[in-house]
Image: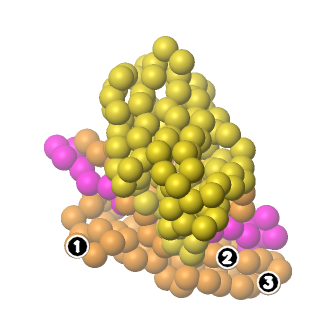
Amino acid sequence: EAGVAQSPRYKIIEKRQSVAFWCNPISGHATLYWYQQILGQGPKLLIQFQNNGVVDDSQLPKDRFSAERLKGVDSTLKIQPAKLEDSAVYLCASSHTYSGRTTDTQYFGPGTRLTVL
Amino acid sequence: GNSVTQMEGPVTLSEEAFLTINCTYTATGYPSLFWYVQYPGEGLQLLLKATKADDKGSNKGFEATYRKETTSFHLEKGSVQVSDSAVYFCALKGQGNLIFGKGTKLSVKP
């Protein structure tokens, strides 16, 4: 079974530029998550999708971050414009759903390391 | 709100030493508890989990027991290897989302 795929693995941009990250979850996983992991900290949830609907985006800085999952499979996270403090690893994860309930176990991709100069 | 506190690192051990990484939590209700591991350059991998009090999760020689009375989920391994060098994250999931501790970096020297 293929794992969660993410691209690119690394990205360096200057502040005020825009950037986009892509994620393809494990096949059949209805729930997809985006996390931000700042160096030395644990991952923090940015947004959770179930199929193509948003379940929780309460911690997404909506003035500059956006995410979509139009067909309920892969997803894109965008930052526009980027700030220095957005330097972090952006992790995508997915989990299975049974009878509408999301299971506890999340499977993570390798992440995208963003450096904002 | 829910939170996880784990011991600060880095932790440096010699090969075959005993490992304990402490984790305590604050939560309402009965959360599920997890340990995730992050090897250098890789994403997080689930190491083990426990879903109710007194459950013991185990995998790859690692163990952790869900202790409700002490709100703890300490990670242990009897004999660590160089290949166990990684960052270990304790996490909980209650009614809301997965909440992680800050991580503990483990380095094992030959």
Tell which of B16 and A71 is nearer to you.
Answer: B16
**Chain designation of label 1:** A
Position of residue B83 measured from the top left corner of the image (x, y, whole percent) = 50, 67
The chain letter of the orange chain reads A
Which of the marked residues, 2 or 3, is nearer the chain's N terminus? 3
In this structure image, what is the colour of chain B? yellow
Is residue B51 shown left or right of residue B41? left
Q: Name the residue under label 1.
A: A1
In the rendered image, the quadrant that contains the C terminus of chain A is: bottom right
Q: Do labels 1 and 3 share a chain?
A: yes
Distance CA(mark 2)–CA(mark 3): 10 Å
Distance CA(mark 1)–CA(mark 2): 28 Å
**Chain designation of label 2:** A
Q: Name the residue under label 2.
A: A114
Q: Residue at x 73, y 67 (%)?
A: A86
Q: Which residue is drawn at 54% across and 66% down?
A: B82
| Secondary structure found at label 1 | loop
Q: Do labels 2 and 3 share a chain?
A: yes
Is residue B68 shown left or right of residue A101? right
Q: Residues within 10 Å of mark 3 (few under 14, many from 20)?
A: some
Query: Which residue is most to the left?
Result: A99
* Magenta stretch encompasses residue A70: no
Above or below: residue A84 compared with residue B78? below
Q: Residue at x 61, y 61 (%)?
A: B108
Q: Are marks 1 and 2 on the same chain?
A: yes
